[in-house]
């Protein structure tokens, strides 16, 4: 957890949520990408997750302050998260 919290923009609370969602370290965040990690955390802890975590994850990958994530990247991330959410909905519809 400390390794994740050591990334720029991610503190202990964010690291705790990320680890609890099954992400074990910075390398896995890099491999999965910000949208997938955010989606996993939000799916597990919907009331504890805001878009600020998505921006912080992307900023950590870019090694910049989260306010510096460009608008076009934010838009792309939102699209990726929406696609992941829709895919999950499609699977649950089939299982019902």
Image (cartoon, rainbow, N blue to C red):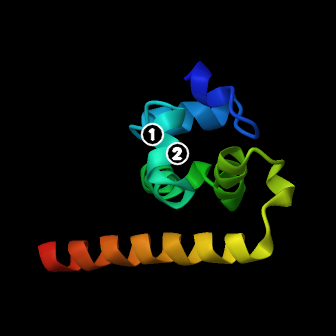
Q: Residues within 10 Å of mark 2 (few under 14, many from 20)?
A: some
Answer whether labels 1 and 2 touch (C-beta < 8 Å).
Answer: yes
Q: Position of residue 56 (x, y in %)?
A: 71, 49
Instruction: Quickly name the residue at label 1.
Output: 28
Q: CA distance from mark 1 to mark 2?
A: 5 Å
Above or below 29: residue 68:
below
Query: Residue drawn 70% across and 37% down?
Result: 10
Quarter holding the C terminus?
bottom left
Which residue occupies the extreme top position in the image? 2
Q: Nearer the viewer, residue 37 or 27?
A: 27
Instruction: Quickly name the residue at label 2.
Output: 30
Identify the mark at residue 15; answer none if there is no mark: none
Query: Residue drawn 59% across and 32% down?
Result: 15
Give left or right: position of 88 versus 10. left
Which residue occupies the extreme left position in the image? 95
On the image, which quarter does residue 87 sit in? Answer: bottom left
Q: Position of residue 45 (x, y in %)?
A: 49, 49
Q: Position of residue 92 (x, y in %)?
A: 23, 72
Above or below 25: residue 9:
below
Give left or right: position of 29 versus 60. left
**Camera sees residue 58:** yes
**Camera sees residue 96:** no
Name the element at disc 2.
helix
Q: Residues within 10 Å of mark 1 (few under 14, many from 20)?
A: few
Query: Residue drawn 51% across and 69% down?
Result: 81
Count the marks.
2
Q: Nearer the viewer, residue 43 or 35?
A: 35
Query: Residue drawn 80% across and 48% down?
Result: 64
Q: Position of residue 76 (x, y in %)?
A: 61, 75
């Amino acid at each position: 957890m400390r390794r994740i919290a050591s990334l720029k923009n991610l503190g202990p609370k964010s690291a705790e949520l990320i680890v609890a969602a099954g992400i074990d370290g910075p390398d896995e965040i890099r491999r999965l990408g910000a949208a997938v990690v955010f989606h996993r955390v939000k799916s597990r802890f919907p009331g504890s997750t805001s878009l600020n975590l998505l921006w912080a994850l992307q900023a950590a990958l870019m090694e910049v302050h989260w306010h510096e994530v460009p608008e076009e990247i934010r838009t792309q991330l939102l699209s990726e998260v929406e696609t992941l959410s829709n895919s999950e909905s499609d699977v649950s519809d089939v299982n019902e």
